[in-house]
Image: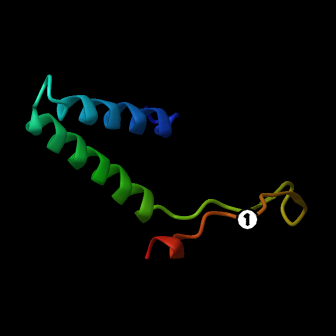
Amino acid sequence: MQQDVEFGIVQIVDIALRAISPAVNDPTTAISCVDQLSCILIRWVGRAPPRRYFYDPPHVLRVVIPGSISMACLT
């Protein structure tokens, strides 16, 4: 799940929703899912922003990634 984080998050949310359904009623699993999702969010917020400019060879700009997600929207 390190390569497709969105898929992993969707799977954890799906497990949590099924755990709190009336048929299953397993709050411990739902709480565990919330804990896992909070760990993922903490790692995402704490990461360094990705580079926007790529050079090759040094000092020759080759790629510019337009715009990036700002962490300011989370505060």
Quadrant the C terminus occupies: bottom left
Residue farthest along the top direction in this orientation: 23
Label 1 SS: loop
Query: Where does the image place residue 57, in percent across and percent down from the top left?
Result: 86, 56
User: Viewer-proximal residue, 25 or 75?
Assistant: 25
Taking the spot 29% from the left edge, 53% from the top edge, the residue there is 38
Q: Image quarter for residue 25?
A: top left
Where does the N terminus fall, quadrant-wise? top left
Tell me if residue 24 comes above or below residue 47 in the rendering. above
In the foreground, 17 or 35: 17
Establish if 62 lies above or below 28.
Answer: below
- 4 sits left or right of 62 in the view: left
Q: Where residue 16 sits: x, y (%)?
A: 25, 36
Give the camera-side residue of 38 and 26.
26
Q: Does residue 52 appear to the left or right of 42 in the view shown?
A: right
The x and y percentages for residue 65 are: 77, 58
| Residue 69 at x, y percent in the picture | 61, 63
Total marks drawn? 1
The structure residue drawn at horizontal position 37% and vertical position 55%, both measured from the top left corner, is 41
Residue 46 position (above or below residue 3): below
Rendered residue at 49%/39% (across/down)? 6
Query: On the picture, is 54 further left or further right than 51?
Result: right
Q: Which colour scheme is used?
A: rainbow
Query: How dense is the environment of label 1, judged by Cα within 10 Å: few (below 14), some, or many (20 and up)?
Result: few
- Given the current orientation, which residue lies at the most extreme front position? 22
| 20 relative position to 52: left or right | left
Could you tell me the amino acid type at mark 1? Gly
Return the residue at label 1.
67
